[in-house]
Amino acid sequence: MNMLNSPYARSLRVVVSAISEGRVSLRVPFGHHLLGRPGFLHGGAIAGVLTLACDHAVTVSVFPSNPGCHRFTYTVQFLHGAREQDLYAAATIIHSGANSATINAVAWQDRKDMPIAIATCKYLRSSTGARESGE
Amino acid sequence: MAPFQAHLAGGQDERTLADGAIVTLLDMAGTLSIFAKLGRFRPHATVELRIDSLAVAPAGSGILARAECYHIASRIAFVRGVARTEENLEIARLAATYMFATQ
């Protein structure tokens, strides 16, 4: 399973720039489909990219044999506006346990020391391999 | 409300709606709830949002997001929201803060 081949990821035009031990890096070329208020990328698109980076890190590094794991909660902090430029995102595995994992991701543009947004995603490994429906 | 479109598929697999589509809709609803509370446009930016995923949204379903701005301080607006499928299945909850642009 590769989340980055999903229709949603393809519609954002996300590409993998690097994968190393415990870390996934993505690049999103600038496009007008990413814009929110004039001149700035939409927060939802940024959050979408950050969660894709975390999901991909979990898929390739943490629970590769268990595609049923799911992200049950996440937070995104927006630090400053994203301009009409390429966006980069990198996800790092913070903690990986038997049943759960915590992944952090950071998004930046031309300066890596000036992050656009950071996210923390929490995952639960599903024993059945499938996510429970809302009951 | 966002109707389903094929390019929004791909959360955990292609039979589900991508979470990025849900957070985008909730963030948009949160923004509009601030305008509704104020009764006017006032520019602001999302500071932080938290999404709790309650259930998976099947691909093909439209999503309804409802957000309420429950408090406005001098420069910060506090918002909560919920996203449901058209079948009224609750799929995500939002808690978010927004900061107003300095005049």
Image (tube, coloured by chain):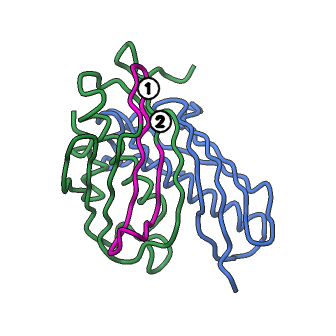
Is A82 placed left or right of A64 in the picture?
right
Residue A32, given in percent of the width and then of the height, sits at: 34, 73
Find chain B in the image and tell me its colour: blue
Q: Which mark is residue A132?
A: none
Residue B93, given in percent of the width and then of the height, sits at: 61, 40
Q: Local crowd at mark 2 within 10 Å, few (<14), some, or many (≥20)? A: some
Q: Local crowd at mark 1 within 10 Å, few (<14), some, or many (≥20)? A: some
Is B91 placed left or right of A60 in the picture?
right
Residue B87, given in percent of the width and then of the height, sits at: 55, 32
Q: Where is mark 1, residue-wise?
A: A100
Type of amino acid at the residue the image marks with label 1: Ser
Residues drawn in magenta: A95-120
Determine the chain carrying the residue at label 2: A
Label 2 secondary element: strand
Q: Quadrant of residue B76?
A: bottom right
In the image, residue A118 lies in the stretch drawn in magenta? yes
With respect to residue B74, does A96 lie above or below? above
Q: Where is mark 2, residue-wise?
A: A122
In the image, residue B80 lies in the stretch drawn in magenta? no
Label 1 secondary element: strand
Q: Nearer the viewer, residue B80 or A73?
A: A73
Q: Are marks 2 and 1 in contact (CB under 8 Å)?
A: yes
**Which chain shows up in green?**
A
Q: Quadrant of the N terminus of chain A?
A: top left
With respect to residue A72, does B81 lie above or below? below
Type of amino acid at the residue the image marks with label 2: Lys
